[in-house]
Amino acid sequence: MSPFPVYRPKRLSLGPLEAEILSILWQLGTTSATAIHEQILEDIDRDLTYSSVATVLRRLESKGWIAKRRVGRAYHWETLVSADNAKVLESHERLQQFLAASNPDIVAAFADTLDQDSLEQLEAITQRIQAARRARAVQQEQQP
């Protein structure tokens, strides 16, 4: 199980181009805006200006997803959140939204519509939660 990330961007929401550029950064690693722009333009059906890429990079930086550092005369961009941690954060956000909009009766009503694999997955989640609670209780008992 992935631990909950220590670092969290200021804003989790991403537009389609922001998500695409973040994905490219995860794929390429720390790199320049030029390399990101070239990667996007490898798709011959795409027409995107360099300035658009630069604008999106600044937006991602202001949201807390990436940071820049100077390398020679250019900036190189690097992610502050791994792809795996981004999935954890996204899942957590969706779960919080679901729980905020639901009540136990509505959630329980969904159980009738789930297939066997989904029910087994929910059971596995329940068992992990219970194991984590037991482990936390043991740790608390052992502390002076």
Image: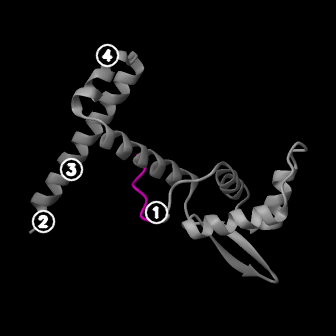
Residue situated in front as seen by the camera: 50 or 81: 50
Q: Answer with mark 4 or mark 3, whichever residue precedes in sequence.
A: 4
Kindly state the secondary structure of the residue where label 1 is placed: loop
Question: What residue is disc 3 on?
Answer: 135
4 or 2: mark nearer the eye: 4
- Residue 111 placement: quadrant: top left
Which x, y percent locates residue 12?
A: 50, 56
* Residue pictured at 22% horizontal, 32% vertical: 104
Q: Is residue 141 above or below residue 31?
A: above
Residue 82 rendering spot, x and y as whole percentages: 56, 57
Instruction: Residue under label 1, please give it.
Output: 8
Neighbour tally class for label 4: few under 14, some 14-19, many 20 plus, Cα within 10 Å:
few
Query: Callout 2: 10 Å neighbours few (<14), some, many (20+)?
Result: few
Q: Nearer the viewer, residue 3 or 139?
A: 3
- Quarter-of-image position of residue 44: top right
With 106 as the anchor, is 91 left or right in this view? Answer: right
Residue at which label 4 appears: 112
For residue 74: magenta? no
Cα distance in 3D space between marks 1 and 3: 25 Å
Tell me: residue 69, above or below residue 25.
below
Kind of residue at disc 1 = Arg
The answer to whether the residues at label 4 and label 1 have Cβ atoms under 8 Å apart is no
As drawn, the residue found furthest toward the right would be: 44
Q: Mark 2 and mark 4 in contact (Cβ < 8 Å)?
A: no
Instruction: Please name the amino acid that badge 4 sits on.
Output: Asp
Q: Nearer the viewer, mark 4 or mark 3?
A: 4
Residue type for callout 2:
Gln
Residues shaded magenta? 1-7
Disc 2: which residue: 143
